[in-house]
Image (cartoon, rainbow, N blue to C red):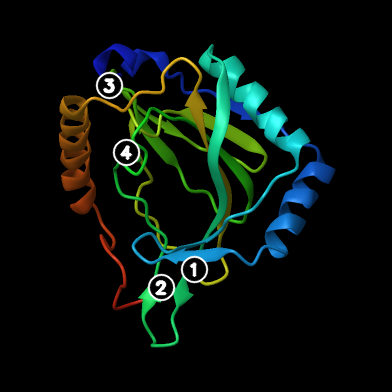
Amino acid sequence: MYGDKMINNFPNVVVSNFLTSDEIVEICLITSQTTNQSFTSSLGHNSWHIRLPDYLVKKFTDKASEIAGEELFLKEYNVSRYENVTSNAGNTYVPMLYPHTDETFKEPRFTLDYQIRSNIDWDIVVDDWKEIKTFKLKDNEIISFSGTHQVHWRPKKIFKDGEFVEMLFMHFGYKKYQDEIDSDYIKKVRDHAAYHKQIWNQTEGPSSNPVSWKNNA
């Protein structure tokens, strides 16, 4: 279930100045104290599997439900930091996000990407099946989309050492739609992502990690 008929139900909205300065500090403090950490080598980012206080979960959930026009509940979330990383073995991993959908989830997800802090601009691109839209997200801003139904990515960008982007990724489930996504639709959206990835691969810059060079200019 939940294929084509849901495509147009996912608005892409940017919300500015969403959190207070104290709330941002709290998220950063929680992240710094979280030991449950992982590194995604293909995308060149570290992730912290944090636990937010209930009042922040409610604040994000209320905003997601308002944008979606549906009652939602928070299912998964984590903080991720994109930056150049050199492993102990000397391999270099750089930030990248190729065109994809979030196939790790079997049921529909409504996604909020919240930019915590950064010192570099890095666009987010979303294909809503009608048009391809580019968003220049700033710190303390949210963008909404469907991670499972809309192909999304970032253009290739060379980070200098010391440049970074920190994000809070939040994936919400629907009260109304809890069955698994239709397998035919999964194939359709996978083919759509592959089309975009073929174009993305041809743009300037590395297409996979680790890379054999690093730009420190």
- According to the picture, the residue beneath numbered tag 2 turns out to be 215
| Quadrant where the image shows the N terminus | top left
Of callouts 2 and 1, the N-terminal one: 1
Tag on residue 101? 4
For the residue pair 204 and 55, the one nearer the viewer reads as 55
Residue 4 visible in the shown view: yes
Q: Answer yes or no: do the residues labelled 2 and 1 have beta carbons within 8 Å?
A: yes
Q: Residues within 10 Å of mark 4 (few under 14, many from 20)?
A: many
**Residue 2, quarter of the rendered image:** top left
Q: Secondary structure at mark 4?
A: loop
Is residue 119 shown above or below 39?
A: above
Mark in front: 4 vs 3: 4
Marks 2/4: CA distance?
29 Å
Q: Is residue 123 left or right of residue 56?
A: left
For the residue pair 92 and 156, the one nearer the viewer reads as 92
Q: Secondary structure at mark 2?
A: loop
**Residue 62, quarter of the rendered image:** top right
Q: Answer yes or no: do the residues labelled 2 and 4 have beta carbons within 8 Å?
A: no
Of callouts 2 and 3, the N-terminal one: 3
Amino acid at the residue labelled 1? Lys
Mark in front: 2 vs 3: 3
Mark in front: 4 vs 1: 4
Q: Is residue 16 left or right of residue 204?
A: right
Q: Secondary structure at mark 1?
A: loop
- According to the picture, the residue beneath numbered tag 1 turns out to be 160
For the residue pair 73 and 171, the one nearer the viewer reads as 73
Marks 2/1: CA distance?
6 Å
- Residue plotted at (21% across, 31% down): 186
Of callouts 4 and 1, the N-terminal one: 4
Mark in front: 2 vs 4: 4
